[in-house]
Amino acid sequence: MILIGAVSAWCPSTASASEDFPLARSQKKCRKMETAPHIVAVGSSTMRGTLGPMLKRLLKKQKFQFRLDNRAKSSTGLARPDFYDWHAEAQKIADAGRPDIWLVSLGTNDYQAVRV
């Protein structure tokens, strides 16, 4: 499984250092956001059923202000763009809303060889 969290322009201004977010105390030079960050979660059923909801609960527990858009689709991966084309879908998502944070979990369904 590939799990990547890419942060482009997010500053947890309401975060306090904790066991869950130990890096919060080192966030000194980040821009203050005018609105809650838009987080887009993409991936397979792992993101839909486990990681996405877990992230949402954790961030709410930490009192983060955010907007989570879970765009995961079950039974998908990178090996079968004929079934579901994540490259094209990611571009559509980016064009539609320009997320601040991308959370990607893909690979659990890629037991077939990925052809390049």
Image: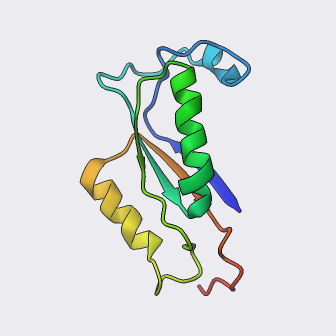
Apparent side of residue 48 relative to residue 20 in the rendered image (left or right): left
Query: Which quarter of the image is occupied by the N terminus?
Result: bottom right
Q: Is residue 39 above or below residue 61?
A: below
Q: Please identify the quarter of the rendering in which residue 57 is found.
A: top right
Q: Is residue 64 above or below residue 47?
A: above
Q: Please identify the quarter of the rendering in which residue 108 is found.
A: bottom right
Q: Which of 7 and 51 is in front in this view?
A: 51
Q: Nearer the viewer, residue 98 or 84?
A: 84
Apparent side of residue 94 relative to residue 114 in the rendered image (left or right): left
Where is residue 70 shown, x and y percent of the image?
44, 51
Apparent side of residue 58 relative to residue 101 in the rendered image (left or right): right
Where is residue 61 shown, x and y percent of the image?
57, 22
Where is residue 98 shown, x and y percent of the image?
32, 47
Q: Is residue 96 above or below residue 19?
A: below
Which residue corresponds to the image point at 58% horizontal and 62% vertical from the top-left? 45
Farthest front residue? 49
Protein image colouring: rainbow
Which residue corresponds to the image point at 66% horizontal and 23% vertical from the top-left? 21
Which residue corresponds to the image point at 27% horizontal and 57% vertical from the top-left? 95
Where is residue 10 shown, x and y percent of the image?
45, 30
Which residue corresponds to the image point at 64% horizontal and 83% vertical from the top-left? 114
Q: Please identify the quarter of the rendering in which residue 32 is found.
A: top left
Numbered circles on residues, count: 0
Query: Which quarter of the image is occupied by the C terminus?
Result: bottom right
